[in-house]
Image (cartoon, rainbow, N blue to C red):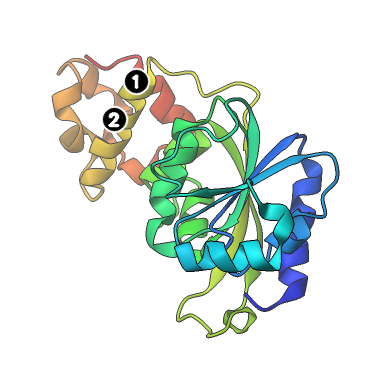
Amino acid sequence: MNDENISRKIVGSLQSFMFNNLLEVGPGGGALTKYLLELQGIQFKCVELDNDKIQWLLQTYPSLHEKIIHGSILEIDNPFGGSFMMVGNFPYNISSQILFKVLEWKENIQGMVGMFQKEVATRVAAREGSKVYGVTSVLVQAFFEVEYLFEVDETAFTPPPKVKSAVISLRPKAQYLPMKSERSLFVLVKTAFNQRRKTLRNAVKSLFDPLILQDEIFNKRAEQLSVEDFGELTFKMQ
């Protein structure tokens, strides 16, 4: 990323969150890192998989010594052992998996500000009725308030990618969505959207008693149900 204004804007978006520990995912060429290192009174770490980039970062920013975790965000344990904030220009090829990692760490995540491929960012923020509303939308919104912050033009990168980008933030909900269990929610949502063209009655019939399936809500398709609807339905599952 070569646009300093975008980097400053992303770092500026962290100011509305309270945190002491900050993890940057995929610092790469340090576009965000150089501004993150200027933040006062926080403990900073970053996780980077590419060894060449790590060497470059250490030479360019000597203060990063002992602050870089060499590995994949998808495979590391909680880097602080407690609560932390997450930020990054996330690698687009694993962005959905990163969101599931955030869900896995949700008890410790104080917030997240991240750049995603626009398509992914739009999906995470989508509400019921939208064509792009799906599994990720419901599962993330069950635990986090999602805010679609701003879009980033292709020209902000060298070389320019073939896709547009957008920055979103996730803020933990004061109270999670009421649900029978997280497993029930995951199973219901994935089963419902797996056959999104069918009515809910046909898509999820294996999960409910035939009597329950007569309820009118099952005439709808998955994308017509709100996050709250999914939560309520988990209590009626077999």
Q: Residue drawn 20% across and 32% down?
A: 204
**Residue 200: x, y in percent?**
25, 36
**Residue 11: x, y in percent?**
75, 56
Between 112 and 138, which is closer to the camera in this rendering? Answer: 112
Residue 108 vs residue 5: left or right?
left
Residue 66 vs residue 61: left or right?
left
The reply to whether callout 1 and callout 2 are in contact (CB within 8 Å) is: yes
**Residue 111: x, y in percent?**
65, 39
Q: Residue 110's image quarter?
A: top right
Please determine whether, in this image, residue 6 is positioned above or below residue 135: below
**Residue 53: x, y in percent?**
53, 67
Please determine whether, in this image, residue 9 is positioned above or below residue 213: below
Q: Residue drawn 28% across and 38% down?
A: 190
Residue 212 vs residue 166: left or right?
left
Q: Give the residue at mark 2.
A: 188
Q: Give the residue at mark 1.
A: 234
